[in-house]
Structures are given as C-alpha cells and as structure tokens.
C-alpha cells in the first residue's frame, strides 16, 4: 500500500475524467482502494424505496468515489494545483506544497 498525500479536509481539483476542473473538499479517503470522495464531484443518482427516513422515496443524488490519481491538491497560497512533498521538521513529518514550499 502506498503513502497517500491527500487527506480528509483538503481542497482539491479534478485533473482528469468527466469532472475535470471541478473543485471540492475531500470528505473521505479509502486507502485500500486508492479512492476519495470529493464534495459536489462525481454525483450519481440512487433510486430509493420509501422508508421511515425518506417517506417519499425517489431519486437521491450522492457523491461517488474518484481515483486519487485524478485529483490534485490546491495550494492555499497560489490557489493553483500543486504536488505534495513530505519532509521532517524536528521530530515530526509534515506535508508541504512543492510550488510555494509552504507547510500544509
């Protein structure tokens, strides 16, 4: 299993696929599948039967997972996509933006 450099709460941009150019916040990361769920991106329609939670039933829109290789982190300083590096500062490992060299 590889070390993923994208974490929950990061702001990312889709760089490949049907939703290219869309931006959103990472809600969840699945390390074993190398996938992530991004808020407002890759919405799918799910048909639901009426239940106690949803008495109407009908079609519900929800986010589906997207491959990690298809998303890129947005640098908070330059607001552009950037690669992420890991370095040791003191006794802790920290993530940093390779464009602005700023700790994330």
Image (cartoon, rainbow, N blue to C red):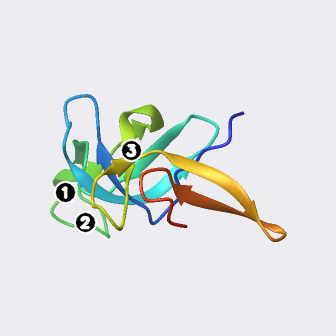
Question: Could you tell whether 104 is left or right of 78 in the image?
Answer: right
Question: Could you tell whether 47 is left or right of 101 in the image?
Answer: left
Pointers 3 and 2 in contact (CB under 8 A)?
A: no
Label 3: few (<14), some or many (≥20) within 10 Å? Answer: many
Question: Could you tell whether 8 is left or right of 91 in the image?
Answer: left
- Mark 3–mark 2 Cα distance, whole angstroms, equals 35 Å
Residue hosting label 2: 54
Give the quarter of the figure containing the N terminus.
Answer: top right
- Mark 2–mark 1 Cα distance, whole angstroms, equals 6 Å
Residue hosting label 3: 72
Question: Which numbered disc, 3 or 2, marks the residue closer to the eye?
Answer: 3
In the picture, the disc for residue 32 is none
Task: Identify which residue is drawn at 28% across, 58% down.
Answer: 24
Task: Identify which residue is drawn at 40% across, 50% down.
Answer: 37
Task: Identify which residue is drawn at 81% across, 71% down.
Answer: 90
SS at circle 1: loop
Coordinates of residue 69 in the picture (x, y in percent): 44, 32
Residue 89 image-quadrant placement:
bottom right
Label 1: few (<14), some or many (≥20) within 10 Å? Answer: few
SS at circle 3: strand
Lower sequence index among marks 1 and 3: 1
Q: Residue furthest right?
A: 91
SS at circle 2: loop
Residue 27 image-quadrant placement:
bottom left
The answer to whether residue 49 of the structure is visible from this angle is no
The answer to whether residue 80 of the structure is visible from this angle is yes
Label 2: few (<14), some or many (≥20) within 10 Å? Answer: few
Closer to us: 40 or 7: 7
Coordinates of residue 25 in the picture (x, y in percent): 35, 61
Residue hosting label 1: 57
- Mark 1–mark 3 Cα distance, whole angstroms, equals 36 Å
């Amino acid at each position: 299993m590889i070390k993923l450099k994208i974490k929950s709460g990061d702001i990312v941009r889709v760089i490949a696929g049907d939703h290219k150019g869309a931006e959103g916040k990472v809600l969840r990361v699945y390390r074993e599948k190398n996938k992530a769920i991004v808020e407002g991106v890759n919405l799918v329609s799910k048909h639901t039967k009426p239940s106690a939670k949803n008495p109407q039933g009908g079609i519900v829109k929800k986010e589906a997972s997207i491959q990690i290789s298809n998303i890129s982190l947005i640098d908070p300083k330059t607001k552009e996509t950037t690669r992420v590096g890991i370095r040791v500062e003191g006794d802790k490992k920290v993530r940093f933006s390779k464009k602005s060299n700023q700790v994330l």
